[in-house]
Image (cartoon, helix red, strand yellow):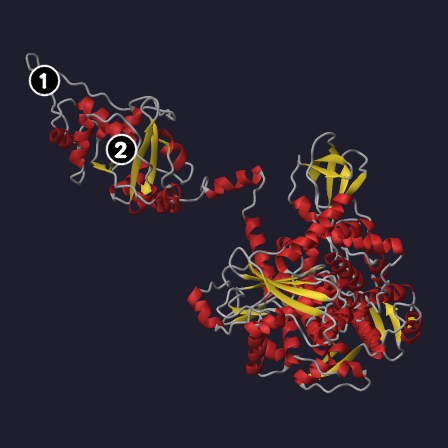
Amino acid sequence: HRADLVQTAVTVERMRAGQIEALKVPTNPLDVLAQQVVAATAMEPWDADALFSVVRRTASFATLPRSAYDATLDLLSGRYPSDEFAELRPRLVWDRVANTLTGRPGAQRLAVTSGGTIPDRGLFGVFLVGEKASRVGELDEEMVYESRVGDVFALGASSWRIEDITHDRVLVSPAPGQPGRLPFWKGDSIGRPAELGAAVGAFVREVAKLAHPEAVERAASAGLDTFAATNLVAFVAEQLNDTGYVPTDRQLLVERCRDELGDWRLVVHSPYGAAVHGPWALAIGARLRERFGIDAQAMAGDDGIVIRIPETDAEPPGASLVLFEPDEIDDLVTSEVGGSALFASRFRECAARALLLPRRDPGKRSPLWQQRQRSAALLEVASKYGSFPIVLEAVRECLQDVYDLPALVQLMRDIDARRIRVVEVQTATPSPFARSLLFGYVASFIYEGDSPLAERKAAALALDPALLGELLGRTELRDLLEPDAFADLERQLQRLDDRRVKDAEGVADLLRLLGPLTPDEIEARSVDGPVALRWAASLESSRRAVRIRISGIEYIAAVEDVARLRDALGVPVPVGVPEVFTEPVADPLGDLVARFARTHCPFTAAALANRFGLGQAVASDALKRLAASGRVTEGEFSPTGRGIEWCDTEVLRRLRRRSLAAARKEVEPVEPAALGRFLPVWQNVGSRLRGADGVLTVVEQLAGCAVPASALEPFILGSRLVNYHPSMLDELTSAGEVIWSGAGALPGSDGWVSLHIADTAPLTLPDLVDIDITERHTAVVDVLAAGGGYFFRQLSDAVGSTDDASLITVLWELAWAGYLTNDTIAPLRSHLSGGRAAHRQRASAPRARVRRRTLTPGRQVRPSLPARMGPPSVAGRWALLPSREADPTRRAHAA
């Protein structure tokens, strides 16, 4: 961009003249101090005063105050609650009586695997695919996320094709001659120092005063070629033509114009660099919120500040908005920096350097988005404590290493003393200098990085949780959570699982994580009960634990809990407790109750009150305060519980996950052999079912399931009931409790048939089978549609049929298609016995006597009349099946 020509020319000119900006060494970086203290004490014990003297010998810590040193030791020795964030666990033991520092187990490994000062950006390593992976370079994780296997990108002077993307690396192969897209990386810009900014402003002022030929010559003398020099001069001239002013070291320009949506853009043109403009933009944003109640979207760059101001009826703000009293700007920026995105990103880096965000595996990549999440969780805890060293270090780094507050204060003084003039203009379209700034403004909101902790959080609403639950239809979890999940998680939270303590440090961790414990409770959580009590006694002798009494019961508590127990429960402070542990805390009862909730499955307010010797009303009030902040939730959770219970939100999430995992395990695939064992039992094959009731049980299970008619009784029912007899099924069909339907014909006289419970038959009947409908079929259906059942001969008379064989064929075609049924199974059996069936049983013919009939000579035999019931294959009463349920959802549920 043309705006880069100005800084390039000035930088080259100053390099040639040897005018290099002053070097600033970080002062008192507490994150590095924490890292080095852990490393030192991991190797050998140190006297706290001696280590302080050694630290003060270094240039960076020559002015380190003892208060900051002690605060760092407090952090490393576990003064802050690690039950809210695990990595706040103590890394060393600070014996305040002997004033010695001793590393805890694991401290040396932590210092070795997570040490260093270069921030971890979560970059993906790029490696050649093959047996020997050769490193090619690194890619930003957002670039990798937007890439796919087969994409070609340029890295260095070559093109590479992506062959595979794993969790921590990108495998590539050479792609010579193929055009590839350019990768991108996101990083922090150092920003222009105020010293260089003043030089840039002086250069612009000088060029703006010269005529065109002299101005081009001046730009060329700075090292630019003719084309670049001409372009630079034209850039300055266009700005003069549009606004009448250019920003210089003696003149600042405030430009106001509208954007594409009609809102106002306020552009502050200044050459003094991002180190000055960053804190200035924070102060402007604070003033906008104070005066107009709007959240300004301000962006600071090396060449100025861009502010978006929504459309208002009043006159939009101008230069008066951006000018501050020199004495107020310092405090204003300090108070605002904690809510900035810069602070959030710097806090993440400081916490990593202080070993609060350790690498799980130093050989693997740590995704940046996961680092941000962990950092945000840590910041949420740390922000409660004003003396938290890493919060102070992040603020110090922002104000000293990134921002140049002294230069900003001096700028405000120069403006106040009229040594620097501020002019204001309004333009129809952005000026040339403004267009360059607006380009960076858009980019800053497209590629946002870390979000600040306090980032415009919505005000907490005062809601009635009971009323809200009724309004939303609160779902009670009592019947959804697995009882086994409760028991397992309770043991884990209370350290009653395999994680039994093995030494004195383990007992110290127990007291810190679970709170005060009785001697019996400590024994139950250790590998050796009597020895554990000796470990606890050693902690007492070193002033790391104390004995107290709550409601007449003796407990052993961590010394860090003394102030909470005193202020919340009225427990007297034991003799010999260091003064630092007796300082008041903000919410002592809330801390105790929150820890109790974090280490227990759902509990009642009465259980909490009994543990701490409180009134139930006091316990309920404390729980309601925590519920208002979202730390605990109220409801009915325990499968064996009664009434309202309370549960930590994270504990409830873990219970849900475990219950879901248990439910999924119940339905996960099993071995084929297990299925083979299960199915016969499930289908009652070989069961002890008997009689008509047994048949009804089988029909309920198989309702709607189509089977070959020839297999229904000998194989389906016969294998499920003891001594099955056809009369059992006939009894149910005659009584109207069970009906049968066809579901399609099979070769021969066989067909598909299904049984149904009469009351639910509309839900389980199969769909009708397509057949060729003739007038005879329609006539039969029309007669039966009038209702009731018809014997064969009645039906024959009703339709006017004289051909019994043809009517029998029509009836069975309609029966197999699912239109008709019969009040008995007898015609189905007869129909099967008269033809070829798929599952025909051989039965020995019963022996019978043959009665010979003697005819009288000359006597004629009278032909027999057709029986009223009709042939055996159509015996019984025929009727239409009930209408099918039209709702597919109800039918699917019934199936």
Residue sitting at 39 percent across and 41 percent down? 702
Q: Residue 274 at what x, y percent from top left?
A: 73, 61
User: Looking at this rendering, what residue extends furthest in the top direction?
Assistant: 858
- Distance of label 1 from label 2 (alpha carbons): 31 Å
Q: Residue 228 at what x, y percent from top left?
A: 75, 46
Label 1 sits on a secondary structure element that is loop
Nearer-N-terminus badge (1/2): 2
For the residue pair 146 and 761, the one nearer the viewer reads as 146
The kind of residue tagged 2 is: Ala
Question: Do tag 1 and tag 2 residues touch (Cβ < 8 Å)?
Answer: no
The kind of residue tagged 1 is: Val
230 relative position to 648: left or right: right
Q: Residue 823 at what x, y percent from top left?
A: 24, 38
Q: Is residue 84 visible?
A: no
Residue 92 against residue 557 in the figure, above or below: above
Quadrant housing residue 717? top left
Q: Is residue 91 visible?
A: yes
Q: Nearer the viewer, mark 1 or mark 2?
A: 2
Residue sitting at 76 percent across and 52 percent down? 215
767 relative position to 108: left or right: left
Mark 2 residue crowding within 10 angstroms, few (<14) / some (14–19) / many (20+): some
Residue 553 against residue 452 in the figure, above or below: below
Mark 1 residue crowding within 10 angstroms, few (<14) / some (14–19) / many (20+): few
The quarter of the image holding the C terminus is top left
Q: Which residue is mark 1?
A: 861
Q: Which residue is mark 2?
A: 826
Q: How many marks?
A: 2
Quadrant housing residue 381? bottom right
